[in-house]
Image (tube, rainbow, N blue to C red):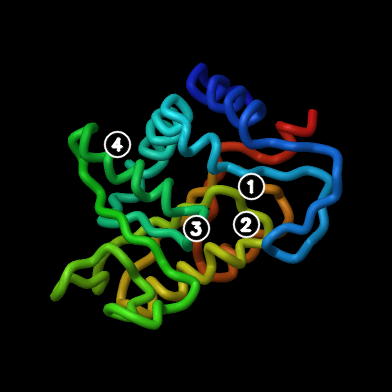
Amino acid sequence: MALSATQRRLFEIIKARSFSYGAEITLASGRKSNFYFNMKPTMLDPEGASLIGQLVLEKLSEARADYVAGLEMGAVPMVSLIAAESFRAGDPVRAVFIRKQAKEHGTRQRVEGLIKDESLTGKRIVILEDVTTTGGSAIQAVKECRQAGGEVVRAITLVDRGEGAAEAFAKLGLSLDALFSAELFLD
């Protein structure tokens, strides 16, 4: 895979700030692995956030999305930075995030970011995720957005570990678009 200059720079930042190799770790999917991505240090880095914004917006432009959404916690920084970058680029896309479970106080909503009388009904939504293994976390977000009346049109991940997520999304009629595959970091 030939990388653009922007992709190469983001790859370097991810490798330095968010990738580790060696000790066995348990992933959110429950699987064991000897390599791990913690994307928060990259998403919260000024240059990393800017590069993620640029690259995700390129992929997002084809989807004609009204909203980006993702499951807490990994997608929260991502949906926020994409909303800001889309505004700067002159093509604003709103953002929401999906709670794993409703809070026991306040509005008790699972979809956060909407105001009273605002809904996802009939809106085109792209699901964002930081790292995708089996797709389970992002699929929770897909189901919640669909239940709220939204039309999920695709999913975008920063890194696809290549462990079944694309196939899981295909079963839902969605494509998974990754900025990077995990194998690039293992070479």
Q: CA distance from mark 3 to mark 2?
A: 21 Å
Tell me: residue 118, above or below residue 80. Answer: below
- When the figure is inspected, residue 8 is found, relative to residue 158, above or below; the finding is above
What crowding class fits label 1: few (fewer than 14 Cα within 10 Å), some (14-19), or many (20 or more)?
many
Mark earlier in primary sequence (3, 2): 3
Q: Nearer the viewer, residue 4 or 32?
A: 32
Q: Which residue is mark 2?
A: 166
Q: Residue furthest left?
A: 117
Q: CA distance from mark 4 to mark 1?
A: 23 Å
Sequence order check, earlier mark of 3 and 1: 3
Closer to the eye: label 4 or 1? 4
Q: Which residue is mark 1?
A: 160
Residue receiving disc 4: 85
Report the residue marked by disc 3: 73
> Which residue type carries mark 4?
Glu
Alpha-carbon neighbours of circle 4 within 10 Å: few (<14), some, or many (≥20)?
A: many
